[in-house]
Image: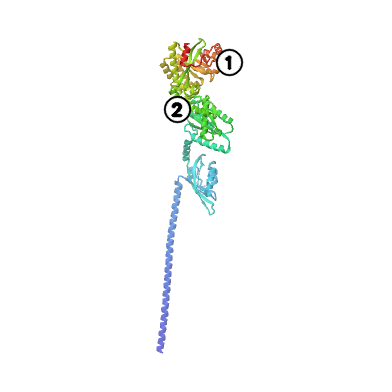
Amino acid sequence: MYIYIAIVATVGIIVFLSAAIYQHKQTIRLLQRQNEEYLTVHEELAAQEEELRQNFKELYLSEEIIRQNDEIHRLVREGANDGLWVWDIATDSKTVSERGWNMLGLSEQPVTTKESWKREIVHPEDLPQMLAEMKRHFSGQTPFYQVEYRAKTAKGGYRWILSRGKAAFDGNGQPLHMAGSYTDITDSKFKEERIRHMAYYDALTGLANRERLTESVKLTLEANRQKGGQGALIFIDIDNFKLINDTYGHSWGDKLLISLGSRLGALANKVGLAARLGGDEIVILLPEMESYEEITGYADKIMRVLEQPTTVNGHVFHITASAGIAVFPEHGDNVEELLRNADMAMYSAKTSGKHTYRFFDKSMHDTVVEKTLLEARLRKAIQNNELRLYYQPEYNLTTGQIDGFEALVRWQSPDYGMVPPLKFIPLAEEMGLIVGIGNWVLKTACAFNQELYKICQKRLRTSVNISVVQLMQEDLVQSVKEVLDETGLPPEYLELELTESVLMEQFEDNTRKLQNVRAMGVRIALDDFGSGYSSLTYLKKLPITALKMDKTFIDDIAIGDNNVTITGSIIEMAHELGLVVVAEGVETEEQFAYLKQKGCDIIQGYLISQPLSSDEFTAKLQG
């Protein structure tokens, strides 16, 4: 029993110990699980701590970046040359940087509205373009908004600014706000304008140049093709301008062109455009003219404007011009053709006596071709000695004898035959050949007079025509003296003939030169008297010795109208002034008798003799 009890006790102890051991193991397992959980929690906490530490660091860095960005933005605002702006589109509030306001000289206004900006700041002419560019950007047509416009300053003027910006959009594509900058581009705009002015405007006169004229005519022609209508080009050339340059120098000519260009520019700006092609050639574009009468009226205005006296360096110039008119589309449908045809019409006006204008006519083309060929032949004519002098006798009504002759130049061309002076003398003036021709005529005529004296032992008066170009030469007096010295002709037997229009070109200077010529003993005759100014005031100032009446007065003698009385009065007046009176173009006995009755001193004309060659004149004098 004791053994049984012992066994039971032992078994109980074993059971107890087993349970205890089992419980201990469970406890150990629990502790292990808890430890593992703790370790897991610890690791998670450590990870969270690291994450928090990292987040804190990132937050700190973000705050630093924000602080630095704010500082950068402040430096940008204060240091940038441009003005900055932000526009809240929803509220229409606009903030502009201090620099933006200072750019316009306005006191800083932190907040404004886009509407007030458009209304008060933007130039009205530039507002449509500004709104159009903004609309294009909002519609997605452009990645950025960019426009140039004039902004009003505090002083009431305007400065050019370049505005750039970019908008932010919501999910529906509607603009929320917009930010950008202003750049002052006034100086660059002025530079662009100066460059443009240099490219399209004449540096001397300020008128448009050929390039600008060409573009304007092209645009005008295109517009006219679409809507119909007509316009005109008026090609203007100053009469005898080369003579002014040659005589007074190019600086005088430049000042004259500046004055004339200013007048024409002011006149043309009301209806069209005035352009200087070069030299003294000015073209006026009339883009819209309803009729030929309107164009003619405008051409008349041009002539009147140019006729006004022009003072340069204290000298008064009386300027005239010749003009040609080409009407479009009738006379051409492109720039080159219109300019060419207007130039042809101008040349026609020039050869018709200058100081007038002509409309283009297709027959003028043949005239221009002829002129071109004539120019080439005239240069060869001088080289080949094709020029000839003919001498028309002057008959003294008192003595009944020939006491002088007028030397007349002729061109004996192998191609054209005998070319009359009216056809080639103006051409020679235009080409700059007239001075050489004039000197040759003067020398040849004086030498012929000396030959006649050796043959006939009789002194005759030699009359030689002087052109306006010769008269304007500063060395005119010296040239006459050299010819007299070389040929040996006594000065009192030389007579220089000048027309009234030639004398009036530069009256004071011409009078001074003629006084010096007269002081040598040379005679001076006023040719074609009655066809120009015919002023007694001028007659008293001029050192002339003879009047040669215009042929129209002689022609009227046979008709018997009022001019007959005028002819007698001219003779009487000239005698009272101590002048010799010469009648040209006497062709009938009736004219001869009337002039003799009125006391005319000298006559010449076909009644006495036509112009003669040197041999024919010598034979007539000897006969």
Q: Nearer the viewer, residue 85 or 347?
A: 347
Mark in front: 2 vs 1: 1
**Label 2 sits on what residue type?**
His
Q: Nearer the viewer, residue 163 or 4?
A: 163
Q: Position of residue 473 (x, y in %)?
A: 45, 22
Is residue 314 visible in this depiction of the protein? no
**Label 1 sits on what residue type?**
Ala
User: Disc number at residue 82?
Assistant: none
SS for callout 1: helix
Mark 1 or mark 2, which is nearer the start of the sequence?
Answer: 2
Task: Residue lying at the far bottom in this picture: please name it.
Answer: 1
Which quarter of the figure has residue 46?
bottom left
Q: Which residue is mark 1?
A: 558
Q: Which residue is mark 2?
A: 250
Q: Nearer the viewer, residue 107 or 357?
A: 357
Q: Position of residue 50 (x, y in %)?
A: 42, 62
SS for callout 2: helix
Task: Residue lying at the far top in this picture: please name it.
Answer: 399
Is 142 placed above or below 527 here?
A: below
